Amino acid sequence: VQLQASGGGLVQAGGSLRLSCTASGRTSNSDTMAWFRQAPGKEREFVAAIRRNDGITYYADSVKDRFTSSRDIAKNTIYLQMNSLKPEDTAVYYCASRLLGGSAYCKADNFAYWGQGTQVTVSS
């Protein structure tokens, strides 16, 4: 499975961005895909996850009510709509797929495949 993330950029606080992550190769509709982010000097942290088969989503408390994850099964793509961005949202954002069976979606180690990351910078 290959993941291609895009959509990052520079935005002012309060602005919006939409990230995309397209999967190719041996994808699975029963998979859970997720977004993580990593700021300089910090550990990679969970942002959001979405179940491809039914679209159920999960969010970190820090982004709940501001970020929305969605999917387009036909395009093998997930999205992360980020609104009301804050400077503390600045990070490299990664998409991940193939959650290991029965494991927690909020743990980076539980995902088998990763995209290359896309930089999101929010200026104050």
Image (cartoon, rainbow, N blue to C red):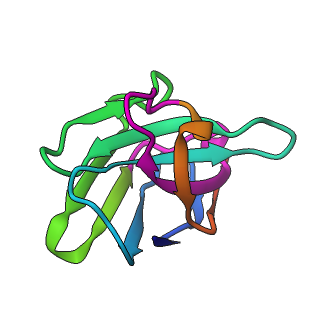
117 w.r.t. 46: above or below: below
Q: In this view, which residue lies farthest toward the right?
A: 41
Whole-percent x and y of residue 59? Answer: 38, 31
Magenta highlight on residue 72: no
80 w.r.t. 23: above or below: above
The residue sitting at 50% across, 45% down in the picture is: 85
82 relative position to 119: left or right: left
Q: Quadrant of residue 28?
A: bottom left
Whole-percent x and y of residue 102? Answer: 38, 28
Residue 11 makes an appearance in the image = yes
Q: Nearer the viewer, residue 14 or 89?
A: 89
Q: Nearer the viewer, residue 13 or 80?
A: 80
Whole-percent x and y of residue 119? Answer: 65, 63
Q: In this view, which residue lies farthest toward the top?
A: 61
Whole-percent x and y of residue 27? Answer: 32, 67
Magenta highlight on residue 89: yes
Quadrant of the rendering where the N terminus is positioned: bottom left
The residue sitting at 54% across, 52% down in the picture is: 112
Q: Quadrant of residue 104?
A: top left
37 relative position to 19: left or right: right
The residue sitting at 54% across, 59% down in the picture is: 113
Residue 122 makes an appearance in the image = no
31 w.r.t. 65: above or below: below
Tally of numbered discs: 0
Start-end of magenta stretch = 82-106
Q: Nearer the viewer, residue 82 or 15?
A: 82
